[in-house]
């Protein structure tokens, strides 16, 4: 009987722990609009990695899932929270996802990964002071952890020139972080993303067969927007993705350049299937 009560108690504790677990409270960005005083912002490259919150013991995703990094990878990380991205390099997102989502880490694959740190969540100091503190915390000689480079621009023209340099080199965009902003969870105008194109999500509703060089493969997909409108996306797919297209019912991320008069995304291209992690 005693063993039964112990078992019930342990089960209750596990259930309670699961129910009270909550995703990390992180800051999220809004979209840059010309007209703000750029002298008040630090600028950095927007990395195409996975957001990873270091809670002092392990990496967590925005949905509170654990990234199982090898012990040697995290051995020199501080015991205080950090905000950053796990990243391999430009145009390596699928390789990165394949590496970091494994519950049993592949040590050789993890040697390609870097933890790119850009904020200090537990601090109540303004961003410029947090940045100075991060420079003290993160040794330049660390092989697994890097501080994301932050720099200044004088005006919109210089910002766009730096954006074009990053895009030409295979990057995704830039981020602006206000000098005096505090680290507050949720979407904030103190953190802005700067891109030539926009990203959005839609649900795959149909596969359309390819023709010509894509005969026998996917030609395009039909997707549904949240407002119920449908449109097609036929570019951005690799040959492998055309042979094994995003499943019907899955949510994909796509890139586009403004909207038509009917509200349909212009020049839309496929980026990836959204990762629920």
Image (cartoon, helix red, strand yellow):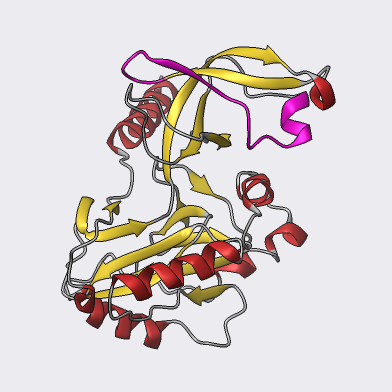
Q: Is residue 114 left or right of residue 163?
A: right
Q: Name above or below for residue 71 compared with residue 139.
A: above
Residue 239 highlighted magenta (yes or no)? yes
- Residue 247 pos. (x, y %): 62, 19
Q: Name above or below for residue 155 compared with residue 220.
A: below
- Residue 13 pos. (x, y %): 34, 34
At x 38%, y 60%, the residue is 55
Q: Is residue 83 visible?
A: no
What residue span does the magenta drawing correspond to?
A: 225-243
At x 31%, y 85%, the residue is 132
User: In the image shown, does 81 or 48 lie closer to the viewer?
Assistant: 48
Residue 232 highlighted magenta (yes or no)? yes
- Residue 156 pos. (x, y %): 30, 70
Q: Name above or below for residue 39 compared with residue 58.
A: below
User: In the image shown, does 108 or 159 lie closer to the viewer?
Assistant: 159
Q: Is residue 103 left or right of residue 49?
A: right
Q: Name above or below for residue 25 compared with residue 192.
A: above
Q: Is residue 53 visible?
A: yes
- Specify the quadrant that holds the N terminus: top left
Q: How many numbered markers are drawn?
A: 0
The image quarter in which residue 195 lies: bottom left
User: In the image shown, does 250 or 242 lie closer to the viewer?
Assistant: 242
Q: Is residue 22 left or right of residue 253?
A: left
- Residue 103 pos. (x, y %): 63, 44
At x 36%, y 33%, the residue is 259
At x 53%, y 76%, the residue is 76
**Extreme-front residue of the structure:** 261
């Amino acid at each position: 009987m005693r063993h039964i009560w112990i078992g019930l108690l342990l089960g209750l504790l596990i259930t309670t722990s699961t129910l009270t677990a909550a995703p990390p409270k992180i800051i999220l960005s809004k979209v840059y609009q010309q007209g703000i005083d750029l002298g008040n912002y630090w600028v950095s490259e927007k990395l195409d990695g996975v957001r990873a919150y270091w809670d002092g013991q392990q990496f967590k995703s925005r949905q509170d899932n654990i990234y199982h990094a090898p012990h040697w990878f995290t051995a020199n990380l501080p015991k205080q929270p950090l905000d950053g991205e796990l990243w391999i390099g430009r145009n390596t997102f699928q390789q990165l996802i394949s590496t970091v989502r494994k519950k049993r880490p592949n040590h050789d694959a993890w040697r390609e990964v870097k933890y790119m740190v850009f904020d200090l969540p537990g601090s109540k100091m303004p961003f410029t002071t947090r940045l100075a503190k991060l420079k003290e915390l993160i040794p330049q000689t660390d092989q697994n952890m890097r501080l994301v480079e932050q720099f200044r621009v004088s005006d919109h023209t210089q910002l766009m020139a730096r954006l074009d340099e990053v895009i030409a080199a295979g990057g995704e965009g830039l981020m602006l972080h206000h000098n005096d902003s505090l680290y507050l969870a949720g979407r904030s105008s103190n953190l802005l993303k700067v891109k030539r194109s926009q990203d959005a999500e839609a649900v795959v509703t149909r596969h359309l067969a390819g023709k010509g060089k894509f005969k026998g493969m996917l030609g395009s997909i039909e997707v549904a927007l949240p407002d119920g409108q449908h449109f097609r996306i036929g570019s951005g797919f690799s040959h492998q993705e055309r042979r094994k297209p995003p499943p019907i019912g899955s949510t994909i991320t796509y890139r586009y350049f403004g909207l038509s008069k009917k509200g349909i995304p212009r020049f839309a291209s496929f980026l990836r299937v959204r990762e629920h992690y």
